[in-house]
Image (cartoon, rainbow, N blue to C red):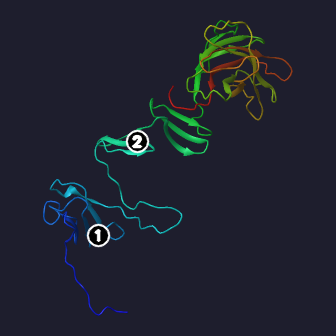
Amino acid sequence: MALGQTLEILSPVQLGTGNVILAWGEGVPDGDAEPQLTAAKGSLYIQTNATDDESPFWGKVANGSSNDDWVQLWVNKDESTTGKYLECYLEFTTDAKLRFRSSANYAYSPSAGIVRCAATTGWQFGGGTNYLQLDGTTGALTMAGTTTVTPPSVPLPIATGGGTAASIAAFNAAPSIDLDTDGQTFYASFDVPNNWDADTDLTLVLMVGNEIAETDGDDVSITCQVRGYADGEEMSDAGQAVACLLELTGGTEAINIINRVTGTIDYDEATYPIAAGDTVVIKATVNLGGAGECTGPLHVVAWWVEYTADRLGD
C-alpha cells in the first residue's frame, strides 16, 4: 500500500538532550564545522554518496575539533554462511596494537615501513604439522614437519688428518686426497650444527675422481667409522660403520670422471648415536682391488656432511 503522506526530516536530528545527533549528507563528516563540531561523542553521520560497497556510516569518537574525531564504521555486507570478510582496510596509528587472545600477543607498527610482532611462544605460518614458527622472544625461525631447508652442509677438509692416504696431491688442477692402495685411511671431524633437526640421519658425501678407466660395474667403496662425542666423554677407536658406495657404470667408470659417492650416518644407531652438540670424528678407509671394487688410484676432491635443518642460522 502506498503512503498518501510523507514526513520529511532534515539533517541533523538531535537525539535527546545530550547533543547526540544523527546527521547525513554528501562527503565525509567535517569535524571542525557544525553540526559535527559540537556533536557529542557517539553521534552518527551517514555519507549519502559513499563509494559502492564501502561503509557509509561514521561515528564520533573524540572531541578534538578536527576531522579525525569521526571514524568510518565497519559494515559487513557479506551474506554467505561460509565466512565473513572485511571489505575495507584497517589502519593502525603508531603504537596501536592488533592483539590476539592476550595483551602479550600482538602486532603493531612502531615506525613507518616497520611491522613488529610479539608473542609468548611464536608466530606460525602454515598448518597442521608443517609450518614455520618465528620465535616471539629470540626471533629464531623454526621449521616443522616437511618444511625444511635442504640440504645445508658442513664442509670437510682436503687433508689426511694423520691417516695413511698416499698424499694430498693435485688431480686435474683440483686438490685431492690421493688413494692408491687398499686400506689407506684419512680422517676428519666436525661439530654437529645447532640448526640440525636432531631426528634425521646425516649424509656423508664424497666427490671422487677416477685416475684410470675403471671396470664397468666396479664400486667406489670407502668404509667409514663415525662417532659423536659429547663434552667430557671418553674417546676410543670405535664407532658406527658407514658404507660409502657407488657402482660405476654407463660411462661413470671412465678416466677422469668425478662421481658423487654417499653414505648414511645413522643418528640413532644403537651403540654410537649422534646427538646435538656432539663433535663427530670420521675415520675413512678406501677399499681397492677386491672383488667388485675399483682398482684405483682414486681422488677425493671434496667431501662434506649434509643434514636437515629445522631453522635458519644457529
The amino acid pointed to by label 2 is Tyr
Q: Is residue 231 visible?
A: yes
Q: Is residue 6 above or below residue 77?
A: below
Which of marks 2 and 1 precedes in the sequence? 1
Q: Residue 174: in sight, yes or no?
A: no
Looking at this rendering, what residue extends furthest in the front direction? 17
Front-most of residues 171 and 283: 283
Q: Could you tell me the amino acid type at mark 1?
A: Ala
Residue 280 drawn above or below residue 114: above
Picture disc at residue 94:
none
Is disc 2 surrounded by few (<14), some (14 to 19) or many (20+) residues within 10 Å?
A: some
Outermost residue on the left side: it is 33
Q: Which residue is mark 1?
A: 50
Residue shown at 32% from the left, 61% from the top: 73
The x, y position of residue 35, in whole percent, is: 15, 66
Is residue 287 or residue 249 the one in the foreground? 287
The picture quadrant where one finds residue 11 is bottom left
Residue at (78, 17) in percent of width and height: 287
Q: Nearer the viewer, residue 216 or 30?
A: 30
Residue 106's disc number: 2
